[in-house]
Image (cartoon, grey):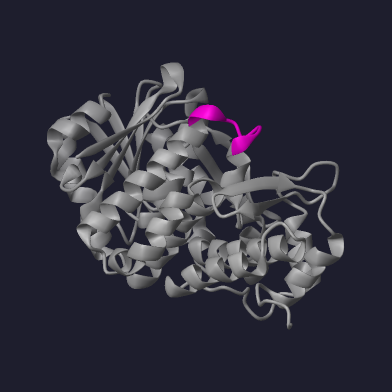
Amino acid sequence: MIRVDVELAERSYPIFIGTGLLRDATLLGRAIKTRQVMVVTNDRVAPLYLDSVLTGLGDRQIASVVLPDGEEYKTLESFSTIMTALLEHRFERGCTVVALGGGVVGDLAGFAAACYQRGVRFVQVPTTLLAQVDSAVGGKTAVNHALGKNMIGAFHQPAAVLADLDTLATLDVREFRAGVAEIIKYGLIRDREFFEWLEANLDALLAREASAVTHAIKRSCENKAEVVAADEHESGERALLNLGHTFGHAIEHALGYGSWLHGEAVAAGMCMAASMSARTGMIAPTTRDRILALIARAGLPVTPPAGPTVDELLAAMRIDKKNQGGRIRLVLLDAIGHASVRDDYDAQALLDVLASGAVPPAA
């Protein structure tokens, strides 16, 4: 088992990465210390792992909420379902909410934990690659609204993260590749050596070779932990973690939540950001092509889907937490391994990228 720590003074917490963690009653007991425990999961994960977690928790007051699976259920209605269950079971402020599932479950359960009695203990048990490398770490919790993604939420750090690599065995190919998108992101924004490692080891990662998967998750969590420790509430460096997300969230919103997986939309968004960076002279076209090549090798989209118009994408991008003074702020690339938040770009370049996706302009 590997341990990575998120250093946040009195709110510091460990990320445990390994196999068999859901069967480790001692580890579960250390992470989940309270008498009352509410496990939030979905109808896809529950048949696979809920019994193991409940058994590992032993003799406590335990309840569970099983939500429908999918981004389209990351709503205030699902949030209300969790809150109702906590109230019906008379859970006290000293309880723990456990998120057993992917990013949607983690965001919903975390937001409920942040709000219930003004904040209760929260533990993440991520079961998807994307959640293990990104969404389960850092304390961002939220629900979607018809007018914008993740616009209703709170920062609420977990007490621990338990990333059981065994859960990835039941992850389908599409979900696994969606998680790889977030892994590539870390290499692009701050870790050139990791990006180069991915270029050399992507086939092993996609084949789910244990050593490659373990290294990719560990290095991703280390990167995320360092950024969160330096900027917990996204007032500076943490915004760089949104590379591709302004474009990606617009794609999700325009298509309807659930049509594309979050990681797929982020992959296309990162390619659009790379294309935008090349069009504005921040990176060379050869660098853009290198980025697109890795994302394409991962089996991820490098262009946005057909259907949404430029105006629809722009309207969605205008509802983004990074925006200031009505100006759309974008995370762009200065080089592989270095990114910056910019609002001084050429507006026509943005329109061109939205119109053409990440396809390089004709010579």
Q: Note whether 217 is above or below 2 in the view shown.
A: below
Magenta stretch secondary structure, dominant: loop
Q: Is residue 239 left or right of residue 61?
A: right
**Between 244 and 29, which is closer to the camera in this rendering?**
244
Quadrant where the image shows the C terminus? bottom right
Q: Which residues are magenta?
A: 229-237
User: Is residue 54 within the magenta segment?
Assistant: no
Q: How many marks?
A: 0
Is residue 1 shown left or right of residue 236?
A: left
Image position, residue 226 (x, y; %): 46, 34
233 in the magenta segment: yes
Which residue is pictured at 39% across the width and 53% down the height? 102
Q: Which residue occupies the foreground of this view, 226 or 336? A: 336
* Residue plotted at (46% across, 40% down): 224
Question: Residue 189, position in %: x, y?
Answer: 55, 49
At a point 41% along the width and 64% down the height, the residue shown is 199
Q: Quadrant of the N terminus?
A: top left
Q: Position of residue 240 (x, y in %)?
A: 60, 45
Identify the residue shown where x is 14% and y is 39%.
Answer: 24
Q: Quadrant of residue 159?
A: top left
User: Farthest residue toward the top?
Assistant: 10
Res. 169 image quadrant: bottom left
Residue 156 visible? The answer is no
Left or right of 99, for residue 265: right
| Residue 17 position (above or below residue 156) | below
Q: Is residue 125 visible?
A: yes
Residue 318, given in percent of the width and then of the height, sits at 78, 54
